[in-house]
Image (cartoon, rainbow, N blue to C red):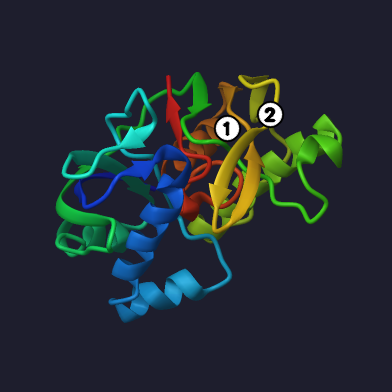
Amino acid sequence: MVVYEVTVKVYLMKDIHIDRAQQYISELIDKGLSKIPELLEMHKRNSYKNYCWNLLYPTEKDKIYKKDNIYSLQIRTTDEALAEFFCNKFFNEYTESIKVLTGDIKIFPKKFISKLYTITPAIVKSEKGYWRDTMSFGNYERRLKENLIKKYNCLNKVKIDENFQLYSAIEFKNKLPIKISYKNISLLGDKFNIYISDNEQAQSLAYMCLGTGILEMNARGFGFVNNK
């Protein structure tokens, strides 16, 4: 299993508030994928997408990305075909808001991971609303671990033994839910540090997580993580 990281340079054709950035970036990626039949089929399929992305960089102090400026977008994936697309076939794609300029690819190094920390808020989808109002912390932990195991099983076409310690602690960085606007609704998420256990299975899932994201809606820019 390999995690690829593609750094995409983009040019903004209008100001974008950071609260709307995920929606605009999603529209750009969707438009690009729709032009490659096999990638469009993958994107429409009800399965894990195996890619994730960060918000534009550098950030702006007033939280508004500026028209006529160039920013970097990090896209990570465990899918070689997707990585090749974002690096070599995504350039010159555009919407009314963003135009892709270039892509540069590298393999994310595999090394011991002591901690993962979220860069974009992690989301748990529920018809009942924000998770803290509807489930216990124990159920949240179970859902997080099960989500990663299902991604790993699907990606590697295996069924691993689930009896292992994934992490020693989760440290939430927000006291109140983080509100994100997306397609005329507000999603509520969290940022946290997760301290990864020192065993082979936990380390493999943590490395995978760098390319797939943590928890849900990763192809929409949620649950992007970095490591220490």
Quick one: label 2 or label 1, which is nearer the N terminus?
A: 2
Which residue occupies the foreground of this view, 170 or 206? 170
Disc 1 crowd, CA 10 A, few/some/many (<14, 14-19, 20+): many
Question: Do the residues under discs 2 and 1 have CB atoms within 8 angstroms?
Answer: yes
* Quarter-of-image position of residue 137: top right
Q: Residue at x 49, y 74 (%)?
A: 44
User: Looking at this view, is 205 or 62 the one in front?
Assistant: 62
Give the structural element (helix, strand or loop) at label 2: loop
Tag shown at residue 84: none
According to the image, label 1 marks what residue?
A: 202
Q: How many marks?
A: 2
Separation (CA) of disc 2 from disc 1: 7 Å
Where residue 11 appears, as percent x and y from the top left, is 18, 48
Quarter containing the C terminus: top left
Image spot of residue 215 (x, y percent): 61, 44
Q: Is residue 8 left or right of residue 195?
A: left
Q: Along the horizontal axis of the image, is 112 left or right of 215?
A: left
Position of residue 171 relative to residue 127, above or below, is: above
* Label 2 CA crowd tier, 10 Å (few <14, some 14–19, many 20+): few
The kind of residue tagged 1 is Ala
Residue drawn at 57 percent across, 42 percent down: 180
Residue ID at (56%, 66%): 47
Q: Amino acid at mark 2?
A: Gln
Looking at the rendered structure, which numbered label has been put on residue 165? Answer: 2
Looking at the picture, tell me which residue is in the foreground, 191 or 178: 178
Q: Residue at x 35, y 45 (%)?
A: 16
Judge whether 224 appears above or below 165 on screen: below
Q: Position of residue 115 (x, y in %)?
A: 51, 21
177, 89: nearer the viewer: 177
Question: Residue 116: horizontal and vertical position, in percent?
Answer: 50, 26
Q: Classify mark 1: helix, strand or loop.
A: helix
Q: Is residue 168 left or right of residue 9?
A: right
